[in-house]
Each structure stands twice: as structure tokens, then as C-alpha cells.
Amino acid sequence: MIIQLNTDSHIKGDESLASHVETVVESVLGRFSGQITRVEVHLSDVNAGKAGSNDKHCTMEARVDGRPPVAATEDAETVRDAINGAAHKLKRALDSSLGKLGK
């Protein structure tokens, strides 16, 4: 499972953030690793650096072998909270989507 991180110009996409994304994705979505070829994580600051609540946005999209992509989004106070929320929403969506297939 390839994990691809994309950030806007207002979020510092450093090694620490990449490591956090990888850890969260692998721990939350690890049981689907045989079916997921790639997970794309898109992070943005909706207010472009200005103060505001729930202005960190994460879109997480899983590319599933032979199926349409499955995506989830989360808005939160911090980037890490947005990542965690999107990962758990994506897990529920994959449970639903792949569970119906008996996988």
C-alpha cells in the first residue's frame, strides 16, 4: 500500500507529518492493505493561515484494487485531528463497501 501525502502551501509537509500520516493510515487501514493499492492524503488550511475553528481539512482517498476509489473528509482544529478523523471515516466506508462484497 503506497501512501501519498499532498499539502497546500499553508501546511508544512515535513518528515514528521509524513511519518504521522503513515502511522495513522497503516494502523487504521492496515487490515485492508491487501486490497488497497494507494492511499492519497490531501491536507489544506481552509482559512489560509488565519485563525479559525475547524479550518484544517483532510481528504483521504483509498484506491481499491478493481473498485472505484473510496474517499472520506474531516475538518478539525489541528492537522493531526483532521488526519485521524478522515482515516476513521475511511475505515468505516471501506468496511461498508468491501464488507458487502464479502471480502
Image (cartoon, rainbow, N blue to C red):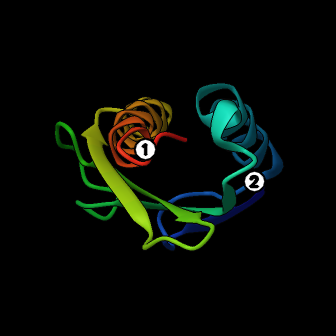
**At 74% across and 32% down in the image, what residue appears?**
23
Badge 2: few (under 14), some or many (20 or more) residues near its Cα, within 10 Å?
A: few
The quadrant of the image that shows the C terminus is top right
Q: Residue at x 47, y 65 (%)?
A: 10
Indicate the position of residue 31 as horizontal and vertical percent values.
67, 31
Q: Residues within 10 Å of mark 1 (few under 14, many from 20)?
A: many
Residue 45 in picture, x, y percent from top left: 35, 58
What type is the residue that disc 1 sits on?
Leu
Give the distance between the C-alpha atoms of the residues marked 2 and 1, in whole angstroms: 28 Å
The disc at residue 14 is 2
Residue at 21% x, 39% y is 54
Residue at image point 55% right, 66% down: 7
> Where residue 46 sits: x, y (%)?
26, 61
Q: Is residue 84 left or right of residue 38?
A: left
Which label is found at residue 94? 1
Q: Secondary structure at mark 2?
A: loop
Label 2 close to label 1 by CB (< 8 Å): no
The three-letter amino acid code for the residue at tag 2 is Asp
Query: For this view, does 23 lie left or right of residue 40?
Result: right
Snapshot quadrant of residue 33:
top right
Tell which residue pokes out farthest to the front in this image. 102
- Picture coordinates of residue 67, whole percent (x, y): 49, 70
Q: Quadrant of residue 76?
A: top left
Element carrying mark 1? helix
* Viewer-side residue, 39 vs 41: 39
Viewer-side label of 2, 1: 1
Of residues 89 and 22, the one drawn nearer to the viewer in this rendering: 89
Q: Where 28 falls versus 56 (above or below)?
A: above
Locate residue 56 relative to residue 28 in the image: left or right.
Answer: left
